[in-house]
Image (tube, rainbow, N blue to C red):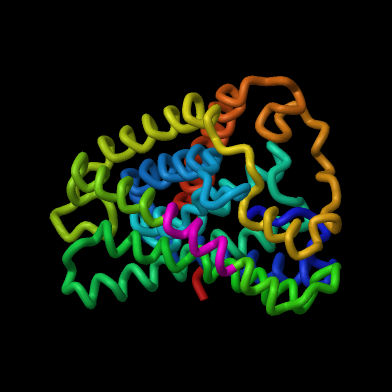
Amino acid sequence: MHVPDHFLNDPTSVATGVASLAAVGYAVHRARPELTRDRVVLAAATTGFVFAVQMINYPVAAGTSGHLMGGALAAALVGPWLGMLSVTLVLLVQAVVFADGGLTALGTNVLLMAVVGTLVGWAVTRGTLRLARGRGAPFAAGAGALVSVPVSALVFAALFAVGGTVAVPLGTLVAQMLAVHTLIGVGEALITVGVVSLVFAVAPGTAVLDTRARAHSTRAAATLGAGALLAAVVLSSFAAATPDGLEATAESVGFAGAARDHALGTFPLADYGEVGEIFVGVAGLIGVALCVVLALGGLVGSRRAPRVVT
């Protein structure tokens, strides 16, 4: 659900940018007490993994595909605040390095996927866990993932109703976005259940949802790192080439033509190497490395920064 430039008008894009900046700033503040060495390493590995898996579009209907948003998954692994920061870094790297998601729409994409996706996913996950009395954490995370995608789609529809650059029937837009992103949410849930279950099995106590004693995160980070390399270098070549849920909806409802070309669309790594004729696996490897390095540098810097006493 990477929104391109000019689907939303400038005032709406500025508003989503301000809201996203405030949310991410608050997430930094809330995450700082959690920044132990192990948690930083796990968050960096989670960031690289989310980037890699987002490269893999999976078919959900005839002519339509979806990909992981990752907010509920990141929250299940490292908590909502670090999860929000992880997904934000992924979106930043995608927009600036790979021309995936508009530059003026970066605030919108952060709001939809990093803020709404993560917080809704976490809230549903925790609520499901309480109903299940703490049992079945991977499936609770899957429930959070399932709900987070269509909710984010509905938020986009609401933003488009306020600041869309093309007049479209609102009911049709809502129905299309909800239908296709509910299907995408099923894929998101399956991926989330599988990954959280694997992390629980490999390194019990590492993920924040695991109620067992805390364990060292090295095995969990290594598992996510190996998964990121597999997804980015190998599996990305087999990604579905059909339009994703937002693109398919835009074409169907009639606002696809509103998108502007990405300002960095001629850069060699744009479209994950397609512009520069770089093998997509190499582009994916570069992206994973950038995400991990930025996450490590940013989180370590945040941990060492002096606290402001008020």
Q: Residue at x 77, y 66 (%)?
A: 13
Q: Residue at x 75, y 23 (%)?
A: 276
Q: Nearer the viewer, residue 32 or 109?
A: 109
Quarter occupied by the N terminus: bottom right
Q: Residue at x 47, y 53 (%)?
A: 70
Q: Could one spot residue 295 in this view of the protein?
A: no
Q: Quadrant of residue 201?
A: top left
Which residue ends up furthest to the left in the rendered image? 213
- Residue 281 as seen in the image, left or right of residue 208: right
Q: Position of residue 44 (x, y in %)?
A: 44, 42
Q: Nearer the viewer, residue 139 or 117?
A: 139
Q: Position of residue 211 (x, y in %)?
A: 17, 60
Q: Quadrant of residue 14?
A: bottom right
Q: Quadrant of residue 271?
A: top right
- Residue 220 as seen in the image, left or right of residue 46: left
- Residue 132 as seen in the image, left or right of residue 246: left
Q: Is residue 48 magenta?
A: no
Q: Residue at x 55, y 52 (%)?
A: 61
Q: How many marks?
A: 0
Q: Which residues are magenta?
A: 178-188
Q: Is 29 situated above or below 256?
A: below
Q: Is residue 186 magenta?
A: yes
Q: Position of residue 262 (x, y in %)?
A: 81, 45
Q: Position of residue 228 (x, y in %)?
A: 43, 34
Q: Is 63 situated above or below 238?
A: below
Q: Does the magenta stretch mainly form a helix, a strand or a loop?
A: helix
Which residue ends up furthest to the front in the rendered image? 62
Q: Could one spot residue 136 in this view of the protein?
A: yes
